[in-house]
Amino acid sequence: MHSVTYSMGVSLDGYIVGPDGTFSWTAPDEEVFRFVTDEIRGVGVHLLGRRLYETMLYWETADQDPSLDDSMLEWTAIWKPLPKVVFSTTLSAVQGNARLASGGLAEEIQRLRAEPGEAEIAIGGATLAAEAAALGLIDEYRARVYPVLVGGGVPFFPQHERRVDLELVETRTFSSGVVYLRHRVARWSAGGR
């Protein structure tokens, strides 16, 4: 079955975007960029909200930029053909290997999970991830925690009053001080915890 994952860069105080609307502090160094590139290889489809989709549009033509290094060209070669589903009430068309969601998030994920294969369903963007979390649809949270406090902005974790128990699956510390934390949502059986 396809796992639904939510992976983003996050400040130590829990934000993916600062109060000024920027996230330049999440620009990965070469080591983190390689890690993120390897992570995206396991994704079969990426679900995006409108704002993240528009931010990521750069990568649809980035391979035409002569200043890109080999690692960025590699990322582009993986990202461009990756199927994307965009959730938006304001867009009437999308570019590249993307389509507008035809239904709600829960039904879209249910349909994608029913498809054959094991590749992950990645969710990008805090608003979309918050909706998926509220519906109990996220299987793994993957945070690349940056050593910075931004003081506010858009939170990584949704702000709803529901407890979610997590199991630590993996950690990694990068030379830049970024710490990767991968947690699986604990889904206990009726006789379990």
Image: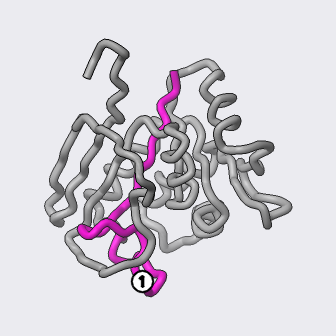
Q: Give the range drawn in magenta.
A: 1-26
Give above or below for 141 relative to 174: above
Is disc 1 placed on a helix, strand or loop?
A: loop
User: Residue 65, percent across and down?
Assistant: 57, 71
Q: In which quarter of the image is residue 42?
A: top left
User: Residue 187, percent across and down?
Assistant: 37, 26
Asked whether the viewer can see residue 64, the reply is no
- Identity of the residue furthest to the bottom in this view: 20
Indicate whether residue 25 is drawn in magenta: yes
Is residue 186 left or right of 6 when viewed as pictured? left
Q: Which of 109 and 31 is in front in this view?
A: 109
User: Residue 113, percent across and down?
Assistant: 60, 26
Which residue corresponds to the image point at 40% horizontal and 47% vertical from the top-left? 162
In the image, what residue type sits under mark 1?
Answer: Pro
Indicate whether residue 83 is drawn in magenta: no
Which residue corresponds to the image point at 67% horizontal and 63% vertical from the top-left? 50
Which residue corresponds to the image point at 70% horizontal and 35% vertical from the top-left? 107
Is residue 36 left or right of 90 when viewed as pictured? left
Give above or below for 185 relative to 82: above
Asked whether the viewer can see residue 181, the reply is yes
Q: Name the image quarter holding the C terminus.
A: top left
Q: Which of 188 and 150 is in front in this view?
A: 188
Residue that badge 1 annotates: 19
User: Residue 36, percent across and down?
Assistant: 37, 51
Q: In which quarter of the image is residue 52?
A: bottom right
Q: Nearer the viewer, residue 44 or 161?
A: 161
Colour style of the rendered protein structure? one colour
Give above or below for 184 relative to 179: above
Crowd band around label 1 with a 10 angstrom C-alpha radius: few (<14), some (14–19), many (20+): few
